[in-house]
Amino acid sequence: MLIEKDFEIKKLTSFKIGGKIAKVYFPETVDEFLQALDAEPEAYVAGNLSNTLVCSDGFDGALILTAKLDDVNINGNNILAQAGVKGPKLAQIACENALSGLEFLIGFPGSVGGEIFMNASANGQVISDYVKSVKVFDREKGVLSLNKSDMDFGYRTSICQKKNYTVLEAEFELISSPSEAIKKRMDANLEFRKSHQPLLNLPNCGSVFRNPQGYSAGKLLDECGFRGKRCGGVKVWDNHANFIVNDNNGTSDDVLNLMLEMKSKVKEKFGIELNSEICFLGEVKL
C-alpha cells in the first residue's frame, strides 16, 4: 500500500487549498483500508477531498484516502461500486449499460462514498432513490452491511453522519432505459451545471451551505449582497452567492472568515442559521 509522509495535499483538493499532511494512506482494496485503519485508528477518512477544506497549516495526523477503491461490477439492473468511484465515471458506466437513475452524477466531482454519506442530489434525482444496500465500516463493530431502510436518508444526510460510518461500497438498483435518452439527460445536466455552478477550473467545493428548510441558501445570501464579496484570495462566485471560489491563491483562513461573515449576516438579517455543507480537516472549524 502506498503511504506518503509530509504529503502536500493541496493539489488533491477541489479548493486547491491545504498544507502538509503528516501521513497519507492510499489503500487499493478493502483489506488494505482495514489495515490502514488498524494502524491509524484515529485517522481522518476521505474520498476525493471534493467537499473538504483542509487547513493551510496542514494536519499533524493521518489521512486515509479511498480514491483508489474504484471497482465497479454490473449484474442486470444492479451496479456495485466501491467508495472511491467518481460520480462522472459511474454515470458513464450506467449510461453505457442502458441503466438510468444516476445521470445527475455526471457533473459531480465527488466519489460514491461521499455521495452516499451526504445523500447527494441534483436535477430532480437523489442518490438514495436508487440505493439497494451499502457496506460501511464502523470503528467499534467492523464491517456492516446495511439495507436502504437502515440508511436513514434525508436531505443532505444519512446514518453515516450520525454514526460516523465510513462507506466502503454501495449497490444501486437502476432502471432500464435507452442509452441515447440517458446521454441526453446527462448532457442537459452538464449544461445546467455550467450555467449554475462554477466549473472545477475555478477551484471550489460546491455549495457552501445547506438549504434551510423552506429556503434557498443562495437566495438568502444574495439578498445579503454577497455575490462577488472577497476575502483575501477567495471570493463568493459572481453568478451564485452560495459558492466560494479560490481565484487568487486563497487560504483556509480566507474561506473560513468569508463563511463566518456569510453565516453571521444571514442570521442577523433573517434569523436563519446556515449549516455548512463543507467538511473541515485540521485547525479549521465553522
Image: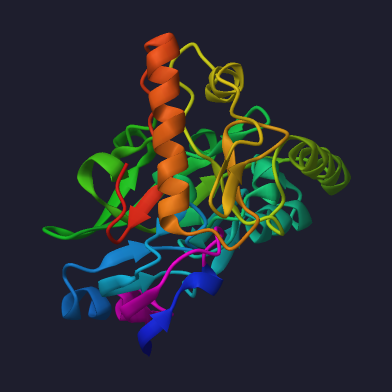
Q: Which residue is drawn at 44% across and 15% down?
A: 213
The image quadrant of residue 34 is bottom left
180 falls in the magenta region:
no
What is the number of callouts on the image? 0
Give the quarter of the figure containing the N terminus. Answer: bottom left
Q: Give the range drawn in magenta.
A: 13-33
24 falls in the magenta region:
yes
Q: Which residue is drawn at 74% across and 40% down?
A: 193
Q: Is residue 62 above or below residue 267?
A: below
> Looking at the image, what colour scheme do you see?
rainbow
The image shows residue 216 at horizontal and vertical percentages of: 55, 19
Q: Which residue is drawn at 35% across and 69% down?
A: 57
The image shows residue 2 at horizontal and vertical percentages of: 40, 89
Q: Residue furthest front?
A: 232
Foreground of the two, 194 or 166: 194
The image shows residue 10 at horizontal and vertical percentages of: 50, 71
In this rendering, would 31 be left or right of 38?
right
In this rendering, would 12 be left or right of 6?
right
In this rendering, would 136 be left or right of 46?
left
